[in-house]
Every structure is written in C-alpha cells, then in structure tokens.
Amino acid sequence: MAFHGALRYPGYKMASTGTSSTVHRKRVVLLGATGSIGENTLRVITAHPDKLELVAVAARNNWPKLAAIAQQFNVRHVGVFEDSAFAAARRNAGDFPAGTRLLGGIQGLIELARLPDADIVLVAVVGTTGLEPALAALAAGKDLALASKEILVLAGKFVMAAARKHRVKLLPVDSEHNAVFQCLEGHPNAGVRRIVLTASGGAFRDWPAEKLAHVTPADAVKHPNWSMGPKITVDSATLANKGLELIEAQWLFGLKPAQCTTVLHPQSIVHCLVEFNDGAMLAQLSPPSMTFPIQHALLHPERAPGVDSPIDFTRLVGLEFRPVDEARFPMLRLARETMAAGGVAPAIYNAANELAVAAFLDATIPFLAIPRVVEQTLATIKNFEPTDLAAVLAVDAEARRMTAAAIPRFAP
Ligand code: MG
C-alpha cells in the first residue's frame, strides 16, 4: 500500500487505498474502562476489530469488571488505581488472562499511558486523576484522546504546550469539542469569530426556580438525553458541565474567553456551532450517543460506519435553540468569570465544584448550595498565574481543603 509522506500515525490504515490491506490496527490504551465513556469505547472497538485493538485498560477500583474486559478483549496490561482494589485484583490474578501484567496506583496508570506497544491513549478517568497519565502519554509521543475535561480545566496551559512540543494529536472526545474539532478541520482558526457549545439544560431545564431548592440527588442524576455517571449528570443540571466545557474549549482551540459561548438546545443533536468572521456557521449533528465522538477520535482521520444509527429525517426531527438564563444557572456565570480572571481560577472552580457535587450527592448540602460553595472558595483563594504544574496541583489541593472545611456551613 502507498503512504503519502511520513507515517506519523503507524496504526492508521490509509483510507484512500480502498482495499483491506492492513499495516496493523491502531492500538488503544483505555484509562477509565469501566465508566460510561469506557463502555461506549468498548462498543466502538468491538465494531471495528480490523481497525482497533485494545492493548491496555485501567479503572479506579472495579477490578472484576476489568478482569471481564481483559478476558473478552485479550488484554495483557491492566491498571487498578486504588490500593485496596489493586491488592484484591492481585489476590484474584487468576480471574485475568494468563500472563496479565497488573499495575497499581498512579504510577501504574502512567506506565500504561506510555506503553511502547500503543498508538493512542484515551483518558476517561473521572476528575483530575488522568492529568499525569495524559502528560506521560504526550511525552511518550502517543496521540491523546481526551474525555476527562477536568484535565484541561486544571492544566490546559501545560497540556497544550506538551502536545505542541511532542507534535502529537490531541483529539477531544467530549461531544461538543469533538464537534468543534470536526467543524474547524480545514478552516484556519483566524477566521473563527466564536464557537457556540450547545447545552441540553440538564435535568432541571424546565423547572421553576423555586422548585430547585428542593431538588434531591435522585432528581439530579436523571438526565433527559444522555446516560452518564452521577458527577457529570449533576454538573449538567447546574450547567457547571457547560462552564467546564467553555474553559476546555478555550484551551483546545486557542480562543479568547469571549469567543466561547453557549446556547440551550434541548434535543442534544446539534453539538456545536462554529461562527466564522463572515457570519456563516457550521454545525455538527449526530444523535446523543458518545459512540459518535469516541469513534471519530479513535479512527481520525478515517471515517467508518458508526455503531449507532444516524439521524433519520424520514421521522419528525425538531431542533430548538434558546438563550441560557444565567440567573437560574449561576455555575455558568462563575465559569465565565474564572475564564476572564485566568490564572488558577478555573482550577479552583473545578476543585470546589467536585467537592460540592459530592456533598450534594451525599445529601450533605442542598442543590442550590453548590454555586454558593464554589463562589466562596473562589473568593477565599488569591488568584495567580502558575508557572509550573506543581503550583496548579498545590492550588487544587488547597481549594479542596478550603471547600471541605466550608461545606458543613452550607448544610440545611
Ligand atoms: Mg459534553
């Protein structure tokens, strides 16, 4: 088969040949294999056995599920982040395929991220645990598919610099950012006036403000369109998720805060709009299933048949757009303020939100206290421009300590 220029992505089978001649399959490391992104990634890999090969998996603590995945996909490198779960996995090593290498802790995740036999690393672990593994993957020259938005919110400056330095592809898996990536391909960034990330509005989109005071964790984890983990579903209900995505977009696409905007779109079919200087807009549409962005990121730049059915216009498809009411969703206003402030403010926002959401899910604080907790932590810690990752991690830890100490005061 003919290659056009240097083979930069050795796993990529050139689409232009039109034959089934294969160099080798793209070898995938999946960090966060047991959550909802992990499950959808496994569906994509299963659908494309001729193009994708799973070579390593890791999860926080669900080692029995990791064992089942390792058996099904014949994976020989497995990471378990939490110490007690790692110990349990080792005691039950017989549940994994013979010859499996079991790795523990953050060092285990980092080792998997730089596995010599891998082409692309998909980071989908909850929160900021994936930051060091993501940086390790970039330093090792692996393409990085990024699903954990907290990584860019916390350390976008350093992650983007590492991607440029090591000349690797950074492929967004978050549906809106993957959509922007698709709309921008082939268009110079200089021509972009703004991007518009769509927001479903979450579980309480149509609830009156006074009812929000009595929201329970059970109400908040019911998302109208997407099936996701509890933390991100609560973030969708407060619109903190959209706030984090605005910050993520700013880094990914090198935009100014004012160029990153949102619109309410209840159907979750249009994932973004990109507005160019001449006023024209491009949009990306697909049904609300994460298999679309995951497959795009893993196979990029190849296009292959999708796992889920595309939009069917022989049926009625209504698309609505309306402005977001920031008064009802203060987490969005706070995100915008932290973007404008820059420095470590977005990292503080992220850390405080993570703890406030956990406290809400434990029924320690009411739903409407989440933005109040975050606003207070933001007001308490002095903002500064970080010059290294250690400074960001220190502020992340400080924000967590301050928030944890403050949370009891917000109990009903
Ligand atoms: Mg998203």
Image (cartoon, helix red, strand yellow):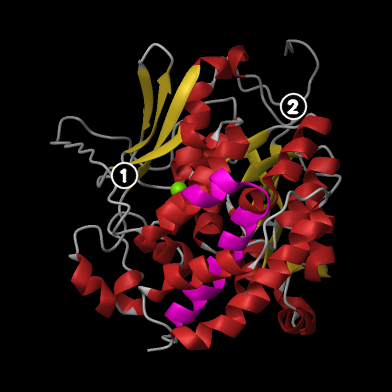
Q: Nearer the viewer, mark 2 or mark 1?
A: 1
Residue 321 picture quarter: top left
Q: Residue, x 76% and y 62% (percent of image)?
A: 393
Q: Which residue is mark 1?
A: 268
Let me know if residue 106 appears in the view. Answer: yes
Residue 218 placement, left or right of 208: right
Give the x, y percent position of residue 188.
Answer: 57, 15
Q: Classify residue 249 by image quadrant.
A: top right
Q: Amino acid at mark 1?
A: Ser
Image x and y of residue 311, in percent: 28, 35
As helix, strand or loop, the secondary structure at mark 2 comes to loop
Q: Are marks 2 and 1 in contact (CB under 8 Å)?
A: no
Q: Residue at x 79, y 71 (%)?
A: 105
Residue type marked 2: Val
Q: Quick one: 296 or 391, which is closer to the camera?
A: 391
Q: Of residues 399 and 287, which is closer to you in this image?
A: 399
Residue 167 covered by magenta stretch: no
Badge number at residue 67: none
The label on residue 23 is 2
Q: Is residue 39 left or right of residue 96?
A: left
Q: CA distance from mark 2 to mark 1?
A: 37 Å
Image quadrant holding the C terminus, namely bottom left
| Place of residue 236 in the rendered image (x, y in percent of width and height, measured from the top left) | 39, 58
Q: Main secondary structure of the magenta part?
A: helix
Nearer-N-terminus badge (2/1): 2
Q: Which residues are magenta?
A: 336-362
Where is residue 392? Give x, y as percent: 75, 57
Name the residue located 41 percent from the left edge and 63 percent from the top edge. Answer: 233
356 in the magenta segment: yes
